[in-house]
Amino acid sequence: MRKLGWFILVILMPVLAWAEGGHGASASADLTGTVYGYLGVIVFVLAYALVPLENSIHLRKSKPVLLAAGIVWVLLAIAYIRIGDTHTAHEAIKHSLLEYAELFLFLLSAMTYINAMEERNVFQSLRAFLVSRGLSLRMIFWVTGTLAFFISPIADNLTTALLMGAVVMAVGGDNKKFVALACINVVVAANAGGAFSPFGDITTLMVWQKGKVQFNEFFNIFLPSLINWLVPAVVMSLAIEKRVPKPIDENVEMKYGAKAIMAFFLATIATAVCFHNFLHLPPVAGMMLGLGFLGPLSYHIKLHEGRSERYDYILGARGAESVYPITTIVKSKLDLSSIIEKVSLPAFAIDTNHVVIQWNKACETFTGIKAQEVVGTRNQWKPFYENEQPVMADLVLNYMPERMIDQHYEGHFKRNEYIEGAYEASRFVPTLGKEGRWVSFSGAPLKDETGNLVGAVEVLQDYTEKKAAAQHFDLMKKIARAEWDTLLFFYGVILCVGGLAQFGYLAAISKFMYLGLGATTANVIVGFLSAVVDNIPVMFAVLTMDPAMSHGQWLLATLTAGVGGSMLSIGSAAGVALMGTARGTYTFGAHLKWTPVILLGYAASIACHLFVNARLM
């Protein structure tokens, strides 16, 4: 989603700025040619270079940009202090923080509603309905694309892509060609649909909040957005066979209150629009009022579910499910016999030969198998499986790759955040208890003082009752489930770009692109940049530059930033997310084969906009 092309351009900006003379945000100082400015650009480039490597180095994208944001503003403050100005940097960072606060609260409200609808099975029921209809592959191709195009303006392109991608994979099965083509179609449709609505993408939201395009004016690019999806969709559909796969018998009912939450979400959108258009207040204030709508409804749902005596969890609070008993085991003594017995939860340990060497009393009670029956054997699997297969302790002992763990736990696993080589998973075990139990498994390799591997330990936790309790609606949990890494990433991006703008670099870029090349050419380039770099910093940079251009050109920038990411699978959050869920089927290479067709749609959408909205150009 984010490549180094933008970084190369940014690296060259100090030279450009120096050549152009620089235009800082403060009229009293030009800081583009200072060593602090150069260091600020270098820090941003180095930090952002780590973002596209997130999945390979397992470093969350928010961490490097948060660090870079702080350093950039330290450098900026020092640069101003050196010229005797102690006021400008302070006022500038307050302006950037205000911009972030508006975006943060807006997204927090929207994410909470999306999570609430997901918890009430809104999206799951739609998926179940589609996969059980017995439609042909070509029809599924068009249905998922159409729904992606029209749902993404409301539910955002990422959520929509994941939902429609699940339908595609459920129907397509092992038909890799269909799954790949349908996923490409979903990504293009979701990005195109999100381009003509303030709620469809972060970039459109920023444009709306800045007042560059009014809510109703986004529909001026509806037809160009539609063309952007239809052109490649028509060509790709010709490669889809008309075979009718066997329908999947699946039925998911929406939970109590689901329809009311959907209605409240639409009311929240209407409230945000009214705040902006009629009360001349920021849309975020309307979104937060809409979040307030959800409060009484969530309380009503809680009463309906018989939980009147319980408070909802407070934002950020973690319940008992956050306990990592395995951490205590690994960080205490290395005498396995004494450690395991001290653990109150069911636990056992194996040696390097996968032989059970300890089985505590809690494990005896939980599994119904006495220690003397299993210690000295390799029968640790018996309480959990009908046939012999490795348990979590066996997998982590051999440092099995994640794909092997995935095969045993069907995606319901995660890497432990605190212990190297440790994993946690969950599954329903029908052999435990009278009706089976939901069990979480935490496994970690154990080493002696010299670092040599001596065995592995596994801790079990029965969370059947918690699983049932999790079915209850809890507003604060929906808020806590917001994508905090993404929200903090936005903070880093906005502060970094704001700092570089204050140095004066964005003014130089704006002069080079929008005056030197012309607004239309510059906005077309914005779309290509969005294919190799995340469209959020690209659009925020354009908004920060604030070039003097017509209303039609602002619409063009909105369009190209929104749909440009469709040209590559890494060019949008929707594409990256689907590559993760459809591993090995929808890939960068599979998408790249159809890039020329998608590029044709990109060109057609721009031509359509220039023709249809010629009066605005």
Image: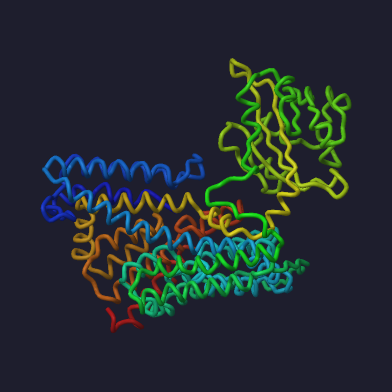
Rendered image quadrant of residue 613: bottom left
Task: Kindly give the residue lying farthest to the top in the view shown.
Answer: 450
Label total for image: 0
467 and 397: which is toward the camera: 467
456 and 161: which is toward the camera: 456
Residue 392 in the image: above or below residue 434? above
Q: Is residue 167 visible?
A: no
- Left or right of 334? Residue 149 is left
The quadrant of the picture occupied by the N terminus is: bottom left
Please report the residue visible at 24 percent of the width from the left and 48 percent of the height from the top.
12
Position of residue 110 measured from the top left corner of the image (x, y, whole percent)? 49, 64
Rendered image quadrant of residue 174: bottom right
Position of residue 4 measured from the top left corner of the image (x, y, whole percent)? 37, 48
Task: Kindly give the residue lying farthest to the front in the view shown.
Answer: 309
- Left or right of 347? Residue 327 is left
- Left or right of 109? Residue 447 is right
Q: Is residue 202 visible?
A: yes
The quadrant of the picture occupied by the C terminus is: bottom left
487 and 177: which is toward the camera: 487
- Left or right of 602? Residue 161 is right
Coloured how? Answer: rainbow
Position of residue 95 measured from the top left corner of the image (x, y, whole percent)? 27, 56
278 and 161: which is toward the camera: 278
Position of residue 380 measured from the top left corner of the image (x, y, whole percent)? 81, 32
